[in-house]
């Protein structure tokens, strides 16, 4: 029995072909077997998973209405707070940190009866595009383990792509859901800023961070999004919205899809070709392609790094070894205690970004960097607002590269450049989906990105769903766990 | 050379909300260390602030009471510095878009002190230093504060203290803070610089942090005046620095070395949406303000005929003012009620804490009734004092303590007879008075009062004595 | 580029120790990132006001909720005593 997506898994559980506990056991065993190779999980949460699965079996026996997520195993990125379960941000700093409270998204999923298999590996504090800044070693790409799974939610993507979880929850500050989804041939949704509560998401850059699903199909992404998109009375920036699952009709007739030339500059031919071919298919299905332009794209990346690092330098100031986290043992005064704790607890990339963030906020540089980046942010928002008067969504590549080889020799800035297509979305707070749309010459997945106006996840997921239908799901990853019932 | 001091104040006031500014933890003073804490106010990873509506409203009320402009949209900002009492390594405050700007206070000497701004921020935790360790308690962390910043408009320590007293009176009257300096719910930083009289430019200033009593505010300013004047007179430069005042030794000492110069790296707090108040919200808050101490003072002196000195004391403490107004109404003589309360009652409650929570045993209406009897001449002032003492001891009404004899008073022929008896028994003061020593008459009044066991009216006795002696 | 002095100043603000850092490599890395960020400093863009979402966000009512049990608050602290978090003024020194 091949349990691929959420609907299939839920169907098998409801029909009694397999119990939730048997399913959880099977996923846990598989995860345990393959984690040394893939490094998808920082921790497996066996006890929690089995207890939740048993409770889910109980609910299924009791009958009545229940969520499609009931009893379905999933993976949660390890920067999302789980009370009583170690949450590390893949950092030495939080290697032994056990939160005392639950993230809002974990509360919601638990209430639906979701079964947590483990905590997904990631770049340290979500800072990275390759997973290689993880203190525990980066997650490997199940398609080709000599390549990275992407970042920063790479562990989540690797687990889902390898069939070690049915779906996953990641976080996306500049592409951290969409890029690993693209590298692993999965669907990744970065929701509108404020759609999903950030409470319990260990902050990287608060005005850019957003939680969302990584799944094997647009339909699954919609189902998970519906479960987690809520206004939270404890997150002032959360707004929530109605669900979108009902909007997946598969029809794209009359949909105005914007193509901005700037996103296609200097692309490798196979990525350029795959995305343009997808555009052609949409057009064949009745969508209208609209040429638009986004001249500020070239400033998006540096503006993003300024804003993200400024906020990161602030958000990570609290790790001083006094209340939680790593603490140094060798120091001669409190100042040295804090400085050594932080330098020993944080990895090189995190330290670099803290230094940059401190620099751009410091007296004398604030106006040239932080203030200017804020002005660019406003200008980019205005440019997006104008674009969305002319089209319903934008179609772009997700990443200008496919899964990079592990241990690649890219400099920090060269690595940052690969985020060029994804960061504008976070800058404006818009929703975007990455969906698989082809393979490069090495057979590695290529992702296309659909960007929408605020709270138009329905349009994006429906377009992605339509594309899956018209391409007979041939680009989707189908590596689900084989379970013998 | 006499220098002119130029002084500005930054006053921190804890707002008396029930819960902290960003979480539901209690703001009550005291408690076991870290017992009023949660993930938010201890800065646990992933926790988010949620702004308390009442904190914003109290801050706006303070602004309205001090004549500030209230901005319908203000922005919270992060102010970064590292200290163990600050769990997030930034204090959530306001920077370039504060809630209130402008406003001010006019002092009794007629000088106007202008306010720069009032902004909202959070308090830090408390540190207890032992020999080798620092113990950290975050119970106070996240208690809402307002910071009230003045222009450098003060010219003396006395002005600064009067301003502080006025702030305290006003903020207590509108109920937004208890302003207890001894508990740290009101404290202030002073900026002091000196210049030659007539100079327009400001001198180099020092800032003395965290003064927690009026006495310290005055003493720190005086000390800084002396220290800076000495430097200037010696031709040495005053260095801009941050200083701490030590109440025991009465001196200020520099707190920070220049190598670790502050750089707060303010930026807008992304976890908190802009603070928005509609015009309607602001009007509603303005309408809810009670009578402010300044207008109460004017009403007491102008409409009720109370002396200014009495009125200042009475308006300073809300419970005292409320008590006075009830006594004044039932006695029918506000001036007398004020004078009686100030001399007979207020003088006996000496601590600030007692005055803030004043709740006298003697019922206000009963006291009013008693004073009414004295006012109409039915009993003497002395008897009124005696009865009040009994009421203060055991409660009850005037009738409970007044005998028929008390009510009769001493007058007419009886008073004349007793006055003559007093003069006969005390020939020396009588002779002294006749020799022109006016004061000697009081000793005879005393003798009359003793003879009547206080039933006589002192003023009437004095008049009778004067008449008899001048006839003689 | 960033000088070693600037780097030290920034590290002091960021509370990072530079002990054991390869200063040349760090200055090169951070310098490269600053250079990359400089595109923004040079961008010629008109002053744009950020457009709000147009939504109103409710504030929290001043109603006490539950504080966390103190044991939980202190659970992750490496050192605590008598209910306090404890910071040592001195530790084991390198010898």
Image: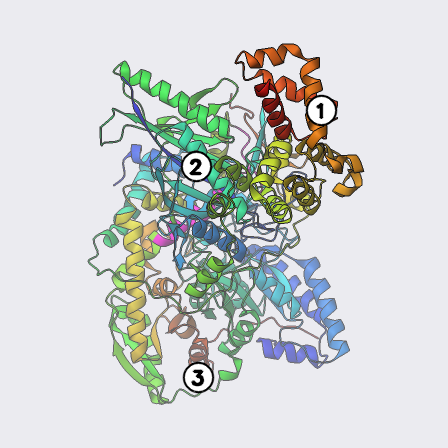
Disc 1 target residue = B417
Disc 2 target residue = B163
Q: Disc 1 on helix, strand or loop?
A: helix
Q: Chain of mark 3?
A: A
Q: Chain of mark 2?
A: B
Position of residue B89 measured from the top left corner of the image (x, y, whole percent) = 47, 42
- Mark 3: few/some/many CA within 10 Å (<14, 14-19, 20+): many
Residue at 71%, 67% in the rendered image: A53
Q: Is residue C20 above or below residue C62?
A: above
Q: Is residue B316 above or below residue A264?
A: above
Q: Nearer the viewer, mark 2 or mark 3?
A: 2
Q: Is residue B58 above or below residue B464?
A: below
Please say if the residues under marks 2 and 3 sit with CB atoms less than 8 Å apart.
Answer: no
- Mark 2: few/some/many CA within 10 Å (<14, 14-19, 20+): many
Position of residue A65 measured from the top left corner of the image (x, y, whole percent) = 69, 80
Q: Is residue A229 above or below residue A347?
A: below
Q: Nearer the viewer, residue A305 or C29?
A: A305
Position of residue A390 measured from the top left corner of the image (x, y, whole percent) = 29, 80
Residue at 50%, 60% in the rendered image: A236
Q: Find the distance from the CA under tag 2 to the CA under tag 1.
A: 56 Å
Identify the image quadrant of the N terminus of chain B: top left
Is residue A6 highlighted in magenta? Answer: no
Q: Chain of mark 1?
A: B
The magenta stretch spans which residues?
A: A307-330
Residue at 56%, 25% in the rendered image: C92
Answer with the quarter of the image where residue B417 lies.
top right
| Residue A252 visible in the snapshot | yes
Left or right side of B241 for B37: right
Disc 3 target residue = A466
Q: Disc 2 on helix, strand or loop?
A: helix
């Amino acid at each position: 029995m091949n349990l691929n997506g959420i609907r299939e898994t839920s169907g098998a559980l409801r029909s009694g072909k397999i119990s939730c506990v048997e399913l959880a056991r099977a996923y846990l065993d598989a995860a345990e077997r393959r984690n040394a190779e893939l490094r998808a999980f920082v921790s497996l949460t066996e006890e929690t998973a089995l207890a939740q699965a048993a409770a889910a079996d109980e609910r299924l026996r009791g009958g009545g209405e229940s969520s499609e997520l009931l009893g379905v195993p999933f993976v949660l990125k390890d920067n999302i707070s789980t009370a009583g379960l170690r949450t590390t941000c893949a950092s030495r700093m939080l290697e032994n940190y056990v939160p005392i409270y639950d993230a809002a998204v974990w509360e919601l999923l638990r209430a639906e009866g979701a079964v947590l298999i483990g905590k997904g590996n990631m770049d340290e504090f979500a800072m990275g595009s390759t997973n290689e800044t993880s203190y525990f070693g980066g997650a490997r790409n199940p398609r080709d383990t000599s390549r990275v799974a992407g970042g920063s939610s790479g562990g989540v993507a690797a687990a889902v792509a390898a069939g070690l979880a049915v779906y996953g929850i990641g976080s996306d500050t500049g592409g951290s859901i969409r890029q690993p989804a693209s590298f692993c041939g999965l669907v990744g949704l970065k929701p509108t800023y404020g759609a999903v509560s950030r409470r319990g998401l260990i902050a990287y850059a608060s005005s850019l961070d957003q939680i969302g699903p990584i799944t094997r199909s647009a339909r699954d992404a919609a189902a998970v999004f519906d479960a987690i998109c809520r206004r939270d009375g404890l997150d002032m920036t959360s707004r929530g919205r109605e669900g979108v699952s009902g909007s997946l009709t598969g029809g794209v007739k009359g949909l105005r899809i914007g193509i901005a030339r700037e996103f296609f500059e200097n692309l490798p031919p196979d990525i350029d070709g795959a995305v343009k071919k997808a555009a052609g298919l949409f057009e064949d299905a009745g969508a209208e392609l609209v040429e638009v332009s986004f001249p500020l794209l070239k400033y998006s990346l540096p503006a993003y790094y300024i804003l993200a690092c400024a906020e990161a330098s602030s958000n990570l100031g609290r790790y001083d070894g006094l209340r939680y986290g790593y603490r140094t043992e060798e120091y001669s005064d409190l100042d040295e205690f804090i400085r050594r704790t932080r330098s020993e607890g944080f990895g090189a990339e995190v330290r670099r970004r803290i230094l940059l963030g401190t620099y751009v906020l410091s007296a004398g540089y604030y106006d040239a960097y932080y203030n200017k980046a804020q002005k660019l942010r406003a200008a980019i928002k205005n440019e997006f607002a104008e674009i969305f008067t002319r089209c319903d969504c934008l179609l772009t590549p997700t990443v200008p590269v496919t899964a990079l080889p592990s241990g690649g020799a890219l400099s920090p800035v060269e690595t940052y450049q690969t985020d060029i297509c994804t960061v504008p979305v976070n800058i404006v707070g818009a929703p975007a989906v990455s969906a698989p749309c082809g393979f490069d010459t090495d057979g590695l997945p290529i992702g296309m990105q659909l960007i929408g106006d605020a709270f138009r996840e329905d349009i994006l997921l429906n377009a992605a769903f339509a594309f899956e239908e018209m391409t007979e799901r041939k680009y989707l990853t189908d590596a689900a766990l084989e379970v013998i019932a | 050379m006499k220098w002119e001091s130029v002084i500005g104040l930054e006053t921190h006031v804890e707002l008396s909300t029930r819960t902290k500014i960003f979480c539901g933890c209690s703001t009550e003073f005291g408690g076991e260390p870290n017992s009023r804490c949660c993930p938010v106010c201890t800065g646990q990873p992933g926790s988010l602030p949620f702004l308390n509506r009442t904190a914003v409203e109290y801050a706006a009320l303070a602004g309205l009471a001090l004549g500030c402009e209230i901005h319908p949209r203000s922005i919270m900002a992060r102010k970064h510095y590292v200290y163990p009492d600050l769990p997030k390594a930034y204090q959530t405050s306001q920077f370039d878009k504060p809630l209130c700007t402008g406003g001010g206070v006019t002092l009794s000497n007629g000088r106007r002190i202008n306010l720069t701004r009032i902004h909202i921020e959070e308090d830090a935790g408390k540190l207890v230093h032992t020999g080798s360790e620092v113990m950290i308690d975050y119970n106070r962390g996240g208690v809402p504060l307002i910071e009230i910043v003045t222009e450098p408009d003060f010219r003396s320590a006395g002005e600064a203290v009067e301003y502080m007293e006025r702030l305290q009176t006003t903020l207590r009257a509108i109920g937004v803070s208890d302003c207890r300096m001894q508990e740290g719910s009101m404290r202030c930083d002073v900026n002091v610089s000196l210049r030659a009289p007539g100079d327009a430019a400001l001198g180099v200033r020092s800032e003395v942090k965290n003064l927690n009593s009026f006495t310290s505010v005055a003493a720190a300013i005086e000390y800084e005046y002396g220290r800076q004047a000495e430097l200037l007179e010696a031709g040495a430069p005053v260095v801009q620095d941050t200083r701490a005042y030590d109440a025991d030794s009465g001196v200020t000492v520099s707190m920070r070395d220049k190598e670790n110069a502050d750089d707060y790296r303010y930026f807008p707090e992304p976890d908190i949406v802009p603070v928005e108040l509609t015009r309607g919200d602001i009007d509603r808050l303005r309408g809810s303000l009670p009578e402010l101490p300044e207008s109460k003072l004017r009403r007491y002196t102008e409409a009720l005929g109370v002396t200014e000195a009495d009125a200042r004391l009475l308006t300073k403490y809300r419970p005292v003012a409320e008590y006075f107004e009830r006594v004044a109404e039932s006695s029918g003589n506000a001036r007398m009620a004020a004078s009686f309360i100030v001399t007979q009652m207020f003088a006996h409650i000496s601590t600030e804490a007692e005055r803030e929570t004043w709740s006298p045993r003697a019922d206000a209406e009963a006291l009013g009734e008693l004073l009414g009897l004295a006012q109409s001449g039915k009993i003497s002032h002395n008897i009124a004092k005696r009865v009040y003492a009994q009421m203060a001891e055991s409660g009850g009404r005037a009738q409970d303590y007044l005998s028929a004899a008390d009510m009769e008073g001493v007058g007419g022929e009886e008073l004349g007879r007793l006055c003559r008896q007093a003069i006969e028994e005390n020939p020396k003061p009588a002779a002294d008075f006749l020799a022109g020593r006016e004061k000697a008459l009081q000793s005879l009044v005393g003798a009359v009062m003793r003879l009547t066991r206080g039933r006589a009216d002192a003023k009437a006795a004095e008049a009778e004595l004067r008449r008899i002696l001048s006839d003689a | 580029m960033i000088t070693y002095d600037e780097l030290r100043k920034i590290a002091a603000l960021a509370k990072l120790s530079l002990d054991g850092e390869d200063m040349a490599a760090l200055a090169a890395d951070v310098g490269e990132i600053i250079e990359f960020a400089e595109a923004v400093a040079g961008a010629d863009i008109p002053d744009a006001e950020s457009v709000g979402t147009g939504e109103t966000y409710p504030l929290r009512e001043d109603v006490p909720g539950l504080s966390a049990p103190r044991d939980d608050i202190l659970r992750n602290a490496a050192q605590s005593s008598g209910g306090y978090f404890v910071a040592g003024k001195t530790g084991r020194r390198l010898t």
